[in-house]
Image: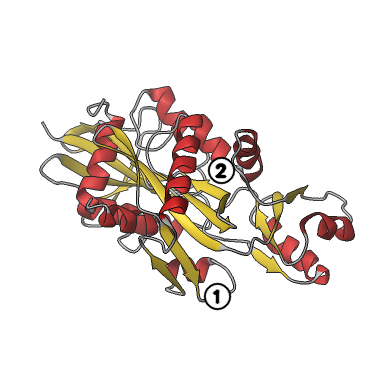
Amino acid sequence: MKKNIAIIMGGFSSEFDISMKSGNVVYQHLNKTNYNAYRIVITRDAWYMIDDDDHRHPVNRHDFTIATDAGKLQFDCVFNAIHGTPGEDGLMQSYFELIGLPQTSCGAYQAALTFNKKDFLSVMNANGIKSAPSVYLNHGQVFDVDLVVEEVGLPCFVKPNKSGSSFGMSKVYKKEELPKALKIAFEEDDEIIIESFLDGTEVSVGVIRYQGKTKVLPITEIVSDNDFFDYEAKYLGKSEEITPARISEAQAQDLSDVVQKAYEILKMKGYTRSEFIFVDDIPYMLEMNTTPGLTPESILPQQANTAGIDLSELFGSAIEDALGENN
């Protein structure tokens, strides 16, 4: 019997439009022989299903069902395509866990941890995975600019601690530029992270559950046309993404080992896409995304395609794994 799959998209953050694109790609490519796919938009004000005539049908948040003329529509599984809050920070994961509905992304704890860059990198550091020197600030906290610069050096990056798609991120070359960069970052989050600039090769690598097993995908090298891998570089074609990356076999193996270690340490499931910079053959971790972009141009689908996995297989395997049919 065909399974009813709710594809959740939208969310509460600046990544709303990107999430809508990802969700619609999943809707278009999900195997129609195996699944009945439904698009569910999550906003602060409303949760609703969009049908093919663009009519909206409200979701009953008590049990995540929809009243239709044919009766109550219930779902077998949720495909999570929300980037940012509430799909990538553990809120939706907690909700679905409470009502007992399987969903494709990681668990609530893993989502909350990886969404908080400070806490996530602290756990990685404790397990021997390196990251850039950094300083953390809360909104309203008094700090000494000279001490911050002494700690992280220049240039440095100023980022919201809990945000994605490079929203609110700046590269700072002079200490006089820090206040403006902080203001931009604090518009996205009330916590920020200031990281040292690492001069090296930037790479991205996905990990998925595929046919019941954990699979590290081919590595992508990122060459940005802009000063760094910002929003334009990620989504507006201002970068070159080379898969497989132009790194040595030894570097590729080391990185694959590191990213699988991180996945297993956190007891992950679903998709992850992690960013690193190689400096002197050592991979330094920047972040881990647990609901990465899913358009054909996005990095993780590119990597899956290089591995011989098309979008229908990629999305279907995530659902089957969530349903436990690959275990």
Instruction: Classify 10 Å Cα crowding around label 1: few (below 14), some (14-19), many (20 and above).
Output: few
N-terminal label among 2 and 1: 2
Asked if residue 30 can be seen in this view, the reply is yes
Determine whether 218 is above or below 47 in the image: below
Q: Is residue 120 above or below residue 302?
A: above
How far from the left and from the top, in percent, is residue 79? 32, 41
Q: On the image, which quarter does residue 240 sit in?
A: bottom left
Q: To which residue does mark 2 refer?
A: 115
Image coordinates of residue 139 in percent, x first then y, are: 77, 50
Q: Residue at x 56, y 43 (%)?
A: 115
Please, what secondary structure does the residue beneath circle 2 have?
helix
List x then y, in percent, for residue 315: 26, 45
* In this picture, residue 137 sits left or right of residue 44: right
The three-letter code of the residue at mark 1 reads Asn
**Residue 96 relative to residue 161: left or right:** left
Examine the image and state in which quarter residue 294 appears: bottom left
The amino acid pointed to by label 2 is: Phe
Dividing the picture into quarters, in which one does residue 277 lie?
A: bottom right
Q: Position of residue 190 (x, y in %)?
A: 70, 49
Q: If the image is split into quadrants, where does the N terminus sit?
A: top left
Separation of residues labelled 2 and 1 (CA atoms): 25 Å
The number of numbered badges drawn on the structure is: 2
Between 244 and 318, the one lying in front of the other is 244
* Along the line of sight, the residue nearer the viewer: 58 or 39: 39
Which residue is rendered at x = 38% and y = 58% of the image?
A: 299
Q: Which residue is mark 1?
A: 226
